[in-house]
C-alpha cells in the first residue's frame, strides 16, 4: 500500500473546531484529503509529478472534472484528474459503489411500486435520472414478460391487468396491458 503525504490547511483545521459546524468542518477536511489522494494516485499512475518531464512518464494530465460524493458528513466535491491517454484508476469510489447500487435498486423498486418521490437520503433526483433508471428496467421486464410459463411449474399464478386509454390514429380507445 502506498503512503501519501497529506497537508491540512490551517483554515480547514479552524473550521473543524468551530462550535456548531462539526459536520461542515469534517466535510471540508475529508474533501481536502480525498482530493490530495486523487492527485497522488494520478502522479503514481503517470509516474511523474505535474509539469515534470521524465523518461518513465506514461501519460499527461488534462485538467479535472468535478464529481459529487454524498457522505454522512455532507456532499463532497472531488476534483478527478483527467489523463490524456487513459483513465485514472482509483480505489476511492469502489467502496461507495455498493451504496450507489443499493440506492439505485431502491429507486427502481420505488418506481415499480408507483412511489412518486424524487428525493431519497437527502438527495434530489431529476425526472431524467428516474427515466434512465426505468430504461434499465425495460429489458428485465421484457425478458420476464416473454418467458414461457410452461418451462417451470408454478404453484399458483396471479394475473393482473391495467386498462389504459390510448390515442391511436386520431381516436381514443381502451387498451388492456
Image (tube, rainbow, N blue to C red):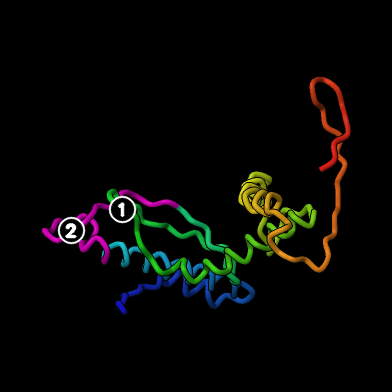
Question: On screen, 54 above or below 20?
Answer: above
Q: Position of residue 74 (x, y in %)?
A: 59, 66
What secondary structure do most residues of the magenta stretch adopt? Answer: loop
Residue with the mark numbered 1 = 86
Say whether marks 1 and 2 touch (CB < 8 Å).
no
Splitting the image into 4 quarters, where does residue 49 fall?
bottom left
Residue with the mark numbered 2 = 57
Which of the image's four quarters has the C terminus? top right
Identify which residue is drawn at 71% across, 51% down.
145
Q: Position of residue 169 (x, y in %)?
A: 79, 21
Left or right: residue 61 compared with residue 15: left
Identify which residue is drawn at 63% across, 63% down.
103
Q: Residues under labels 1 and 2: Cα distance?
A: 13 Å
Identify which residue is drawn at 30% across, 77% down.
2
Magenta-drawn stretch contains 66: no
Dot 2: element: loop
Left or right: residue 97 compared with residue 120: left
Amino acid at each position: 500500500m502506498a503512503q501519501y503525504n497529506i497537508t491540512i490547511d490551517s483554515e480547514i483545521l479552524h473550521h473543524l473546531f468551530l462550535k456548531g459546524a462539526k459536520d461542515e468542518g469534517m466535510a471540508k477536511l475529508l474533501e481536502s484529503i480525498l482530493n490530495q489522494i486523487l492527485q497522488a494516485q494520478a502522479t503514481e499512475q503517470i509516474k511523474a509529478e505535474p509539469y515534470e518531464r521524465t523518461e518513465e512518464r506514461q501519460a499527461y494530465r488534462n485538467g479535472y472534472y468535478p464529481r459529487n460524493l454524498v457522505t454522512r458528513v455532507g456532499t463532497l466535491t472531488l476534483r478527478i484528474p483527467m489523463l490524456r491517454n487513459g483513465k485514472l484508476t482509483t480505489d476511492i469510489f469502489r467502496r461507495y459503489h455498493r451504496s450507489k447500487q443499493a440506492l439505485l435498486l431502491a429507486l427502481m423498486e420505488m418506481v415499480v411500486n408507483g412511489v412518486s418521490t424524487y428525493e431519497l437520503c437527502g438527495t434530489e433526483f431529476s425526472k431524467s435520472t428516474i427515466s434512465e433508471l426505468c430504461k434499465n428496467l425495460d429489458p428485465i421486464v421484457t425478458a420476464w414478460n416473454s418467458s414461457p410459463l410452461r418451462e417451470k411449474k408454478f404453484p399458483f399464478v396471479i394475473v393482473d391487468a391495467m386498462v389504459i386509454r390510448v390515442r391511436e390514429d386520431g381516436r381514443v380507445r381502451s387498451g388492456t396491458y
